[in-house]
Image (cartoon, rainbow, N blue to C red):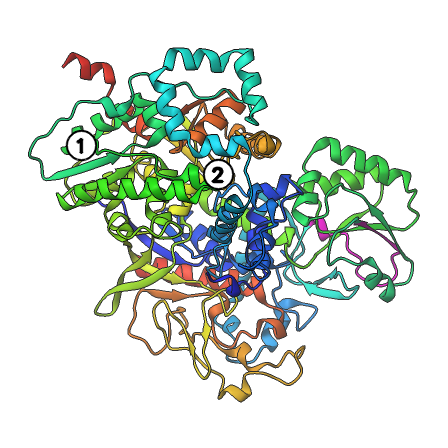
Amino acid sequence: MSVTEYDVIIIGAGVAGLTAGAFLAGRGFKVALVTSGEPTACLSTGCIDVCSRDHNPLLGIKELPPAHPFHLVPEQTIRESLNNFQAAMMDMGIPYAGALTENRFVLSALGTFKTSCLVPSTMKAAPQDTKDSIHIISFRGLKDFYPSYIISRRKNTKFSVYDAGVSSTMGIASHFEEKEFLESFIVWLKGQNIDEDKIAFPAVLGLESAAEIVKTIATRVGKPVFEIPTIPPSMPGRRLFNALKDYFRKKGGTIYWAWPVVGIEKAGRLIEAVVTQSEGRPNSLNARAFILATGSFVGGGLVAGRETITENIFNLPVHVPGPRETWFDNDYFSFNHGIGKAGIMVDSSLRPAGTPWENIFVCGGILADTEILKNGCGHGLAMATAHVAAKSCMEYIR
Amino acid sequence: MNFEHCIRCTICVENCPVLRVNPDFPGPKQAGPDAQRFRSDREKAEDKWVLLCSQCKRCEMACPCGVEPAQIILRAQQRYGLEHPLSPAHLLFANNYYLSTLGSLTAPLANRIAATKVGKKIFSAMGIATYIPFPKFRFRTLRQEKKTRSRRSRKVAFFYGCFINFYRPDIGRKIIQLLKSFKVDVVLPPQWCCGLPALGNGNLALARSFALKNTASLSNYIDAGYDILYSCTSCGLCLLHDYQGILEIPQAKKITENTYDLHEYILRLVDDNYIKPQFQEVPRKLAYHIPCHLRALGIGYPAAKLMSLIPGLTCEILDDTCCGLSGSYGFKKSNESTAIQIGNRAVAVIKKTGAGAIVADCGSCRMQLGGLSGLATLDPAEVISEALGITLEKKRKS
């Protein structure tokens, strides 16, 4: 009897890793997830972008270049992955609004619109056009959220400032979790006699029970209320991560925090174990299959050197989009930085292409040719490819 | 020190339990890597707020870039302690080991005084919080146990730590029984406080002197073929991490390589087929509060793995909340409100599970959570002993 042996080990605690993990653990497999830190999902807006190229994400996906990994996911699996996600989040108390056939808008902190597919219920009431008049509530001392940016872009928009007694995002969000604070805030808000159609907040309305808090404020004030995603610390991103993590655990998965993988044990065409570094001595974790979901550059899955890009866990070949001078466009805000195409090439079962490995499956942001920023396909692609990887993994193990 | 690797993503900020409740603490990012750029050896330290950090290390576990904010802050705390006179409470808790030695020698008297109103007033005057009762000293400490030796192939030297020795020697005795039932020889090597309380109260020199004595003692046992075991996860973290790190103990690497968490060691025995534990049914529902320092050890949750083998036991893992006490941190009047607020959040999460009792490896976590929730608290070793039918009475009969 070995207690440190698993059916599947997942490397990476982002949306892809946790989704694949919950899928497999929910089907009775022994799953462990190792991660060296918390994922970039925490920094995200919490919105699930599937594809922003068309108003209908499914049509948008069809327009993606042939090399895009979305083409490896059957449409049915894309539907399944989003349905599973919505059901899971409902279960965890952070419901998501939206449908796969229709993108929607989220008002940004700059007053622009961000296109997304599924949005947290706290952003559901965001205006979908320029008609609604909006009243923004900000908080004294809160950094990096300036209602004037939004007002400069929108007519019929006003703002008020509330003094929460603290000024950090975490501090304000914590306060909203307290009943007395919420109550006195609502009393203040009612006293503002707001005329506008909708009330907007930076996304600081609680951490654990944001959906409830937004609902309470909206009911008591009698107007639609919505959150505007902020730059990190991003509460909606943290809520998403916490919910995915708790859901994975609920399904029976095990998480090893702060276990950077420093080596592998292999035999023939199989990976037998990953070796992780902990204080004092390395630890091996054995499994029959491995899912690599370590993300792209910021997540740490890909590492760029001067001329090369490497994947440092299995040392998989990385698709590099030409010499270094083609990696970056001169315009910083351009969507056409070549480096957005870097990543791991895979076959239809999401095994890494051009390698002997039978039991590695790759999903999420580390895949090649995703161009996530350009195509607006971050978390949606992660979930869809996680489902494909998990299914291939299941098929392989059986 | 790799503070320059910080990309300012604020994931650490989201994980800081102190920042959530105490706006005076600027958070791990600002107190750590951000402030580090402005710290100069030629100027006196003026960053008193570094003392508000409880050293839970959650920031280090979360950082995706390998920066160690808590380490940076720990060094700043030592420097501040060196350059400024600290409060009497800091001085007392740094010397907790000597104080406890005195306390256990005069146990009946010391306990009685500590429980009286006058005693509490004295504590209060010294800046010591009394919202949870101070743990009771035991006259018969663990180090007075008789030595037993036989010729078994597995032998360990048990670093029991101050908490077990002075306050809960019964748990120590149970652990010894448990190991003996697994055919493991146990000795109690000469030992002192691990040094963490001194470090946590800004007394680097005292911490170092403890560490040097322990290293000399434990090193002899390692040379004689013993593995070192700890059961207090904070002692463990100090032995494994701080001896080689901030304390710069010459033989620290040897200690690190040969020191194991109790349950990690038992799991190895199971994996090596050295033992096949036959657990009896324990029909209980427990909430396993993961101590922050167990997380920080990077060994996974070995006790959770072991307890998962016990039939009838449901044990919900809770690793998102800090208990707030952090050893002597919460016992200081200046941190009292912070510690209570953090602790109550953890208690709310525990109560939500509907568990009948709390399990935690760390004595100070148990003190805090038991005190704030009114629930019974257990060391995982007690649960495992129960499942194996090990009781201390049984030992006395035989």
B237 is higher (above) or lower (below) than B99:
below
Residue A68: where, in percent of width, then height? 52, 76
Q: How many residues crowd around disc 1 within 10 Å: few (fewer than 14), some, or many (20 or more)? A: many
Which range is magenta?
Answer: A121-138
Quadrant of the rendering where the N terminus of chain A is positioned: top left
Residue B69: where, in percent of width, then height? 51, 53
| Res. B329 in view | yes
Q: Which marked residue is nearer to the observer: mark 1 or mark 2?
A: 2
Residue B375: where, in percent of width, then height? 48, 21
- Horizontal placement of B87 versus A160: left or right? left
Q: Toward the viewer: A359 or B60?
A: B60
Q: Which residue is mark 2?
A: B201
Q: Residue furthest left?
A: B151
Label located before the other in sequence (1 or 2): 1
Q: How many residues crowd around disc 2 within 10 Å: few (fewer than 14), some, or many (20 or more)? A: many
- Horizontal placement of B20 versus A294: left or right? right
Magenta run includes residue B216 = no
User: At x 31% / y 50%, what residue is drawn?
Assistant: B249
User: At x 84% / y 48%, what residue is drawn?
Assistant: A161
Q: Quadrant of residue B196?
A: top left
Dot 1 and dot 2 within a common chain: yes
Say the numbered circle drawn on residue B186.
1
- Horizontal placement of B368 versus B103: left or right? right
User: At x 33% / y 47%, what residue is drawn?
Assistant: B240
Query: Which amino acid type corresponds to the residue marked 1 in the rendered image?
Result: Val
CA gap between label 1 and label 2 equals: 32 Å
Query: Which amino acid type corresponds to the residue marked 2 in the rendered image?
Result: Asn
